Image (cartoon, helix red, strand yellow):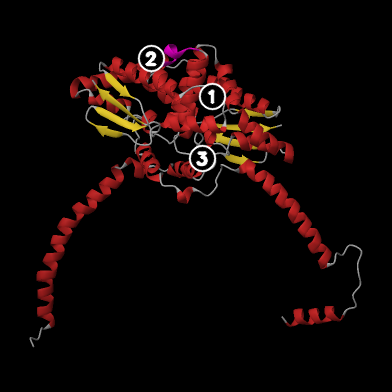
Amino acid sequence: MENSTKKKRVDETQPFVKKENEMPRRIFTKKMVGLGIFSSLVAVSTAQLVSAWLDGGFHQREDLADALKVLVKTYGNTRPYPHKFNDALVKALLRNLDFAVRHGLEKEWADHEADVLGAVFERHINPAIKKTGRKDFFLWGIFERTSCSYQLYEHIDVKDGERTFPCPYKPILEEIQKGLGTYKITWNDVCEKWCRLRWEAFARKAGGVKFKVEPGETCRVYTL
Amino acid sequence: MTELTRRDFGKETLKWGGALSVLTVLNFPEVVLAFENAMLKNPFLQRDDIEYALKSLYTTYDTTSPYPHKFNETLTKTHLRAVELFIKKKGLANKYVAHYITTMEPLLARIKKHIEKEGGDKGLEGMFEGTTCSYQLFERINIKPGERSFPCPYKEVLGHIDKWLGTFTIKWEDVCNNWCIPTWSGFAKKMGIKVAVQPGDECHVKLV
């Protein structure tokens, strides 16, 4: 304490010498204000991109009771296997793929999803990639940003330019084949004729973003 | 004032306090055991993967712009998208519905056996509150003997899609007439029962 006071006193007694790289507080403040305005502009323009996602409305919701009841009912349903929040969605996607594959429509089915979501790419994902130059916005847009993914994958691990998540299809397809045995598709069909085709269709909508998929129980998607 | 020697106090305590304690101990374990059994037998309380479900739920319900999202958002959209492509654009309504019914046949056959023993209501249970495919789709299902009713999830989401994406051509009636009604009627037929559907904001399905 004594030392710092002493040091300060000493400094105050030193003659003011302007160094080359030194910036007076006033100029520094001016620059910071300028930078702040620029940041605000960026924030304002990207705010639209991130709207509709985690906007803090949870506490105002009055329809949580139904959702919680469904959650409790789902997780209380453990026979013949422990059901999860994505059970019906995964089953619907598998059933639609089984139908599409039987009729040779898998490519059209995958492209159709990208087509109907075209506006999302035009309004949000593509401008974000263009403004920032970051291809990660492609992954952001098709994974953690959309209910189509966060209601499908149990969790999504986010790294810059890479997403990994547990495959929701494999365990449910196995259960369906064990309990019903009526589907023609295999897990490999799901990876190649649904996931890959769908993400490729999305990538085309996003201006041809290049990416790779490593399918597995934990699936990995990363931009190139 | 009555004086109590230490010896008498000990005796009294053992006599009344001890008897009370014994009674309590005899009664209490049943309550504790019942509670413990309920805890152990309750499948929900045994799950250790609820964290993921809660996070998904929070993410969903914290998303209120441009419209409030619900737990059935993606499932509803998936059904609508299939109706749009396979039924409306490709004209494969009959084949699409038949595929669903055919792939569910083993399960429908099992439910049919229950219906034969316990009555047609088992069929409605199997189609609605008894399957994730329905209770994860409908916000709530009202149960009456021989009847189920639930808010239609499609109308609202289709409205959102029309407003925010504008890329669907199907109408709400297409969903009712080409998807819901034929599917439920087809399931019912396979189970040996008949149902009547009254579509609406609140949809009713009744045994006939």
Circles 1 and 3: CB atoms closer than 8 Å: no
Q: Residues within 10 Å of mark 2 (few under 14, many from 20)?
A: some
Label 3: chain letter: B
* Residue B161: image location, x then y, percent: 52, 30
Q: Secondary structure at mark 2?
A: helix
Callout 3 amino acid? Tyr
**Distance from Cα at disc 1 to Cα at disc 2:** 28 Å
**Distance from Cα at disc 2 to Cα at disc 3:** 36 Å
Callout 2 amino acid? Thr
- Residue A65 horizontal side relative to residue A101, left or right: left
Label 2: chain letter: B
Q: Secondary structure at mark 3?
A: loop
Q: Give the magenta part as a residue range.
A: B91-98
Label 1: chain letter: B
**Which residue is at 56% across, 42% downward?**
A52
Name the residue beneath numbered marker 3.
Answer: B67
Name the residue beneath numbered marker 2.
Answer: B102
* Residue A79: image location, x then y, percent: 33, 32
Q: Is residue A115 above or below residue B27?
A: above
Observer-side mark, 2 or 3, equals 3
**Distance from Cα at disc 1 to Cα at disc 3:** 18 Å
